[in-house]
Image (tube, helix red, strand yellow):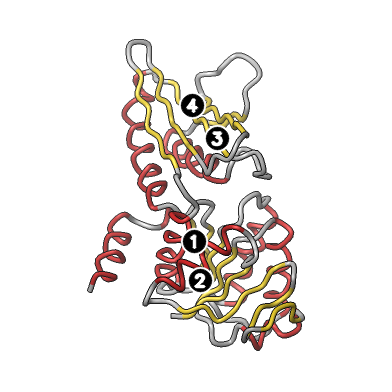
């Protein structure tokens, strides 16, 4: 399969480019960034050439910024021939941007996956956290999420923290409270963000009871794990029917199947 990397000049873009080149399943046909297009060993090409350059790709991977994501939206919307699956890894998108991607999935008849975190460990944490919430919340446990990232991260709380909180809140019918500054209410799931140093990403979910506490967490040790996960999730989305998908639409069984197929 062939991929186009939007945001190729960024740190994650470079990691994903390496991951693509390290696998036998994918090849990189080109990329785009604030510098323009990178295609056929040329850089800085005009966006006017996007439609032609992306023709041979099966998948467009977006790990850019809010502004870069908007630029990609604009280009795809105006491209009457666009028909590629899309993996969106950019974070910090507002609801208006997300709604526009949902519309594009319908209008262009393509499969789009919104993936604020491409770690397979986070997918597992998401599933487990909901199960724990369903058991512990009715017994009076309070649920809090604490996330830490490097000082240069632009959005807070992280897209991953929101993803985890929304998953738990959805099954428990609770509301999400970000960076609480007053008394805790029983219907809340708290989310707190820390920024500093060079932390790749840490997410901890705490279930706090009167007599015991349970904590589950995920710690990223390198950007490489997100790159490898992005490539695997890319293989998943190109096999889906046209539509807008979120990480919670991917089952553990599907992930196991993808991993097993790679070993064949």
Res 247 → quadrant: bottom left
**243 in relation to 24, above or below:** above
Residue 98 position, x and y percent, is 63, 57
Residue at mark 2: 111
Spatial distance from mark 1 to mark 4, Cα to Cα? 26 Å
Q: Earlier in the sequence, mark 4 or mark 2?
A: 2
SS state under label 1? strand
Task: Name the secondary structure under disc 4.
Answer: strand
> How far apart in space, not on screen, are marks 1 and 3 (Cα)?
26 Å
Can you say whether 90 is above or below 39 in the image? Answer: above
> Observer-nearest residue: 232 or 184?
232
Are the two marked residues, 1 and 2, in contact with CB atoms closer than 8 angstroms?
A: yes
Label 1 vs 2, first from the N-terminus: 2
- Around disc 2, counting alpha carbons within 10 Å, would you say few (fewer than 14), some (14 to 19), or many (20 or more)? many
Residue at image coords 62%, 86%:
40
Q: Quadrant of the C terminus?
A: bottom left
Residue 168 rendering spot, x and y as whole percentages? 44, 37
Lateral position of residue 97 relative to residue 160, left or right: right
> What residue is shown with label 4?
144
Residue 177's spot in the image, x, y percent? 59, 29
The span from disc 4 to disc 2 (Cα, nearest Å) is 33 Å
Query: Which mark is first along the chain, 2 or 3?
Result: 2
Q: Which mark is residue 245?
A: 1
How many angstroms separate mark 4 from mark 3 (CA)?
14 Å
Instruction: Using the image, determine if residue 151 lies above or below residue 143.
Output: below
> Of the residues under marks 1 and 4, which one precedes in the sequence?
4
Q: Which residue is mark 3?
A: 148
Closer to viewer: mark 3 or mark 2:
3
């Amino acid at each position: 399969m062939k991929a186009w990397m939007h945001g190729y000049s960024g740190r994650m873009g470079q990691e994903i480019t390496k991951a693509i080149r390290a696998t036998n399943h994918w090849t990189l046909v080109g990329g785009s960034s604030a510098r323009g297009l990178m295609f056929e060993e040329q850089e800085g090409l005009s966006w006017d050439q996007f439609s032609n350059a992306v023709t041979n790709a099966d998948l467009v991977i977006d790990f850019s910024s809010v502004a870069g994501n908007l630029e990609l939206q604009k280009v795809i919307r105006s491209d009457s021939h666009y028909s590629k699956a899309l993996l969106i890894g950019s974070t910090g998108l507002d609801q208006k941007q997300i709604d526009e991607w949902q519309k594009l999935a319908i209008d262009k008849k393509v499969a789009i996956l919104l993936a604020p975190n491409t770690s397979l460990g986070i997918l597992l944490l998401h599933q487990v956290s909901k199960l724990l919430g369903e058991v512990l919340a009715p017994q009076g446990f309070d649920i809090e999420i604490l996330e830490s990232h490097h000082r240069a991260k632009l959005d807070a709380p992280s897209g991953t923290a929101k993803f985890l909180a929304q998953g738990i809140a959805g099954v428990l019918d609770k509301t999400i409270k970000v960076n609480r500054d007053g008394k805790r209410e029983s219907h809340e799931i708290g989310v707190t963000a820390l920024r500093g140093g060079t932390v790749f990403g840490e997410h901890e979910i705490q279930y706090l009871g009167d007599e015991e506490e349970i904590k589950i967490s995920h710690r990223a040790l390198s950007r490489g794990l997100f790159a490898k996960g992005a490539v695997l999730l890319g293989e998943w989305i190109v096999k889906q029917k046209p539509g807008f998908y979120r990480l919670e639409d991917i089952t553990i069984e599907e992930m196991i199947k993808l991993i097993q197929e790679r070993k064949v």
